[in-house]
Each structure stands twice: as structure tokens, then as C-alpha cells.
Amino acid sequence: MRIFCGLAAAFLLAVAPGVRAQLDNAPTPVPLPIPVAAASAAMPAQDLEALRAVHAREINDLSTFKTAGLQREVIDPYLGSAPGQQFLRELRAADPAAPAETIYARAVEQLASGSTLPDLQAMSAALVKIVPHGQNVSPYSPYFTTSAQLQLASGRCVTLADCFGLPLKSEAPLYDVYQILPKGTVNVFVSQVAPTEELGGLVRRRGGAQQYLLPNRSLWSAPVLIGTIRN
């Protein structure tokens, strides 16, 4: 873990004296229902707070959150390919008791979060994930990224929420950064985060960051808090 400390110093912010900033969170594009160019820039903080006040229920239950990612006509053929079959095998290994239709639905949901078909890669290095400060990482979430991608996004995006297509429920002024380590060399599926919209288009995110899909989290260590980063 200590080998990441130098890189972390470039973008992590300690939230308290006792918290150190230790860093552990060329596919082919396809047509999107919502053009990337249509996504709006980050809204002023006061406007976002007004939306939170008026639409608290919809924001909390994610009922209006939509991802403009891969569609079934693209996903289904992929899941019939060798990488797609590997994706399904890893999902089944993560939950052997789940019905086949449940596994397939999970695969579609995860793949639809990207705007590109995932690139299957062997991974033996740490990955990271951001969550609103004070929250924990779900033991089932498959969405992670690399420290390099997080650093790149922090430098090129108006907000991290914009680059990673986050819903308002998951946006915060500060994010805790969690790191996970693979138990050996494992498969990851790398795609580009798709644009998203919420509240009927009042909030739009460009996406564009690289995400690492982990269909079987049991192949990875438990998340460890290693620092914080600004939105």
C-alpha cells in the first residue's frame, strides 16, 4: 500500500490530522441515446441544493436516474462472446444460488453503465472507489477505477461526479477513497463511464472516465479507507 503514497499526495486531502492521504478507487464507442455533447456542465452548488430540497424523494430512491450506456442489441451479442461468457461465469461464481435470469440481468445492468464494450484485462494491482465522506463501500458494488484514472479525472473534470456519472445521491463535497487489492491476478472488465441524466434532464453528467467492472468481488480484499479527495 505504501508504494502508492507518492501518487496520492498529488490529489488526496486529509480530513483530519489523524487521517493520512495514502493512495489505497481502446474499446470501440457505440451510438448513445443521449449525445455526449448534450450533457450540461456542472451546475452551481446553490442550484443543486435547491434541487435536493425540492426533489429529495426522487433523488434518494434514484427513480429518475438514467444511464445513456450500452443497449441490449449491443450487450446481448457481447455476452455470447468469449469475454462475455467469462463475465457471466464470474457473476455466477459470486452468487452460485442465483437463478440464471438474475445473473443475466445483473450482467446487463453492469455493462449498460458503460458507453463502450469492456476490454477484458488481467489485473494484479490495487483499485480504488470513491464514496461520499463518512459512508462505506457496498460489499457488492462492481464499479471501481484506478488511482491514475481518479487523479486524471480530478484534474480534467469540473467535478468528479461529472466524470464518473454519479447520481445526486452519491455526490458530495468530499469523497472518501477506498482501496481494494486482488487475491492474485484476476480478470477486470474496463469500459468508459456512460453519460447519465437525472430529474428528467435537469442534471446531466458527461461520464468519460474509465471504470473497472468487478463481477466477482470475492476475488478482492475488503475495502480499506486510505484518504479523501475533493469533488
Image (tube, helix red, strand yellow):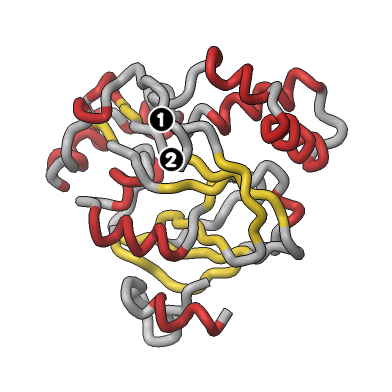
Give the crowd class for mark 1: few <14, some 14-19, many >=20 residues within 10 Å.
few
Residue 194: where, in percent of width, then height? 39, 33
Q: Are dots 2 and 1 in contact, CB under 8 Å?
A: yes
Q: Residue at x 34, y 32 (%)?
A: 195
Residue 176 in sight in this render: yes
**Furthest-right residue in this view:** 97
Q: Secondary structure at mark 2?
A: strand
Q: Residue at x 35, y 17 (%)?
A: 33
Q: Residue at x 29, y 24 (%)?
A: 199
Give the crowd class for mark 2: few <14, some 14-19, many >=20 residues within 10 Å.
many
Classify the position of the N terminus by image quarter. bottom right
Q: Secondary structure at mark 1?
A: loop
Task: Answer above or below: position of 181 versus 73.
Answer: below
Mark 2 or 1, closer to the camera: 1
Say what amino acid the circle numbered 2 marks: Gln
Sequence order check: which comes first, mark 2 or mark 1?
A: 1
Residue nearer the viewer, 170 or 151: 151
Q: Quadrant of residue 73?
A: top right
Q: Quadrant of residue 230?
A: bottom left
**Mark 2 to mark 1 CA distance (whole Å):** 9 Å
Residue 66 in sight in this render: no
Name the residue carrying label 2. Answer: 192
Q: Give the mark count.
A: 2
Task: Answer above or below: position of 176 versus 162.
Answer: below
Q: Residue at x 20, y 40 (%)?
A: 48
Say what amino acid the circle numbered 1 marks: Pro
Residue 144: where, in percent of width, then height? 53, 52
Residue 62 image label: none
**Furthest-bottom residue in this view:** 17
Residue 229: where, in percent of width, then height? 35, 66
Name the residue carrying label 1. Answer: 29
